[in-house]
Amino acid sequence: MIGRGCSQWMAVLAMALTPGFASAQLPTKVVFYTNWYAEAEHGGFYQAVAERIYARHGLDVEVKMGGPQINVVQLLLAGQADLVMGYDLQTIKAIEQGLPVVTVAATFQKDPAVLIGHPGVTALPDLKSRTLLIGQASETTFWPWLKAKYGFTDAQKRPYAFSVQQFLVDQNVAQQGYLTSEPYTIEKAGIKPVVFLLADSGYPPYAETIVVTTKTLTDKADMIARFVRGSAEGWKSYLKDPAPGNALIKKANPEMTEELMAFGVAKMKAYGLVTGGDAKTLGILTMTDSRWKQTFDFMVSAGLTKADVDYHKAYSLQFVKEIKVLP
Amino acid sequence: MSGPGTGQREPALLRAAEAEPARASVVAVDVRGASKTYPNGVHALAPIDLEVCAGDFATVLGPSGCGKSTLLRMIGGLSTPTAGSVVLWPQSPTEATMPSAAGEGGHRVHIAAGRRAKTELAFVFQSPTLMPWASVERNVRLPLDLAGEADDGALRVEAALRLVALSDFARVYPRELSGGMQMRASIARALVTEPRLLVMDEPFGALDEITRSRLDRDIRELWARRSLTVLFVTHSIYEAVYLSTRVLVMSARPGRIIGELAIGEPHPRTDAFRVSERYARWCKQLSEMLAAGSDEAGGTRPLSAS
Amino acid sequence: MSGRSARFVAPAAVGVAFVLLWEALVKAFDVPFYLVPSPLQVLSTLVQDAPLLLSSLLVTLRITALALLLAVVLGVAVAFLFVQNRVLETSLFPYVVLLQVTPIVAIAPLIIIWVKDPLAALVICATIVAIFPVISNTTLGLRSVDPGLADVFRLYGAQRWQTLIRLRIPSALPYFFAGLRVSGGLALIGAVVAEFVAGTGGTASGLAYQILQAGLQLNIPRLFAALLLITLAGVAIFLLVSLAAHLALRHWHESELSLER
């Protein structure tokens, strides 16, 4: 405790001694929209707020929650947010239509999308004979690829109502989910589910990317750099000790439970979502050209986008190249 | 005239007057001691005794609210007397016209399967009560349709429309007709089943003077030509005198018959009759009777033709 | 201009004025297409995506039509039931009111879970939304019989079913159509909202799905084009029901007759 307070005073002192402190006295207000209600999957960002990491970088960050009907990229384009949490496939589609957006960092090196089956299912092809609950958004992300790769059909697909109830009552049902949430709910209901991380089967996109408008990229590059750095540090801190971030998460989303958050953190660590892959060597929140090419090729072959789209416009490595917060 | 609740009658007074040709004394409507008290306690009709004979044009004349409509509805079978009885054609009882015991009542119009619907009575209301969604022809045909006798319906409808001079308007909808024409359509509907008894409850009250007198003339014409028996209700003395062979005067509520006038004028009754001195005298007599009826509750002054 | 043609020209003129204003504002304020597309852009997108959008429109319309049919059949049946027996009506009507106030957004996902077939589930949702005006108005209409006419029917010894068919039903028609006018639009809304929340996806998807996907993929012109189609569908349904009402009532009911006679 004392140590904490001491380091805070140190930070203030450091800030005061930094040249340009007078002009930097007022922290820059930043609005960041996430893609869902507050959850452990957003932990690093909340931690960066809780631990005043953003503040140390001169940013006053307000983390706003997304939700089921909220289209955060539209909010970005309308000027209601400075940065938002997006995803690759959507960003490339945006570029295809000439929307001025660009990805500057990626939280999850692997997409946490999973398919969940009842005990007894050993591999993804086993699901060919089951009823699959697939959400509407997945129609244009992984479903076409699943159909092509594993021979699934539209006939076996039913709409996913974001409730595990159907799965629980019917042995023959498998459903999509997020690595860090549905398996928990299912386990709590007494069934040990079999979980397949789509990323491990070749699903290439990043997840929880940080997206800005091209205008922001031009005009406020410094702010973006500070935000990305602060977020990376926040994630490092969160994975060490999630308590401060969790407290903010619970405040924003009272329905959240400590158990679910703990489950989420455990899974993120176990599968190396934040710290695995390229992040190990290039730093948290990093991205690479080759991954983006993989994602673009994936989209073209799944018929999700046209081959002549200039996908390079969808991302910029300028920040992640400089910022190397190693896990 | 009977006193209240006594059930005694003086037959001489209740038959048609001498000026009319002698008719067979077939009784069309026989009301004995019928009264009506509503569940909420309103005493609408004091015990009534009345008799209408075949061939009569009997008019019930009384002030507003005296219970004429109530009486007519009881005779028509739309409501039942709380005491007394109402019987139609008592001398030739059918399933439809069985006498009703005290407290019961109501008799349905008799429809014999396979036979022409010759209803015992037809009712004409104060308003035309036509179905607005059907043409005049369909409206007039309604009683036949309900009886399941639409086979020669077209002919009978045509005949009925001719009687009321609406033949050109068969396809027209009620909204497109004037008040008088709608009322004529209503009469045509009443006549399509060739009823023996025609009951009319202030049918021309809502119409203008000219239309009214025309319809009065028409209905009298119909009565004479078709040998109908008509029971007519009005509060217009002039109409009563012009139309009727007998006028029964009712007192104010609770209504009772306080007098009767036999009008021995021959048919046809022309416009000249309407402006004659005799006519004025009949009217004066009736208005005196009416006035008496509103002074005291029930009078017992029977008045004769003189 | 005559009264008849004014009925079409006037609203059309308002529509054209609105579109011109929209175009002008978008140009004047240089609104980017990904926030508010111009009318021309929406129309060209509509033409471009016509195969996709029109087939989705058909799916949505099919659900709407089925739901409306079901709402009419069930609603009228319930209304008949209520008219037979006052006790039945008083005891069941509050639950019928439940149908009106149930937020379909909340129960659509549940219905999707219980009813396996997605299209059937959507039809059920849309029916729930559309049925109340039919029940309420038809019941009122069946009871709103001219007492004079009721007397006439009684006098001529009409049997119960004759009174029902020749008197109650025609009397109820204006009320029924009044309810149907509302239910038509509600069936469409129900179909769209239910699909939005619960979804179909893939081959047999309606306009709500297209709107959702267009939003996810940030294809804003297509989103607007789909919305435009829904609007046009709603207007078309209303006009159809009004036409039906006109045909049924034109001879006699005040609502269909002009004031001047």
Image: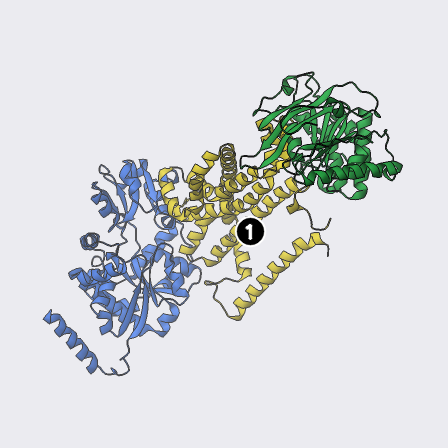
Chain colours: A blue, B green, C yellow
- Judged left or right of residue B193, residue B242 is right
Where residue B157 appears, as percent x and y from the top left, is 75, 28
- In the picture, measured across the screen, residue C244 lies left or right of residue C49, that is right
Kind of residue at badge 1: Leu
Quadrant in the picture for the C terminus of chain B: top right
Q: Residue at x 57, y 45 (%)?
A: C178
Residue where numbered disc 1 is placed: C232
Can residue C72 be seen here? The reply is yes
Q: Is residue A297 above or below residue B180?
A: below
Identify which residue, B245 or B186, lies in the foreground. Answer: B245
Image check: C167 left or right of B236?
A: left
Q: Is residue B173 visible?
A: no
Q: Label 1, secondary structure: give it.
A: helix
- Rendered position, B184 above or below C20: above
Image quadrant in which the N terminus of chain B is located: top right
Q: Quadrant of residue A54?
A: bottom left
Residue A22 falls in image quadrant: bottom left
Q: Is residue A103 left or right of residue B269?
A: left
Crowding around mark 1 (Cα neighbors within 10 Å: few <14, some 14 to 19, many 20+) is few
Viewer-proximal residue among A258 and C3: C3
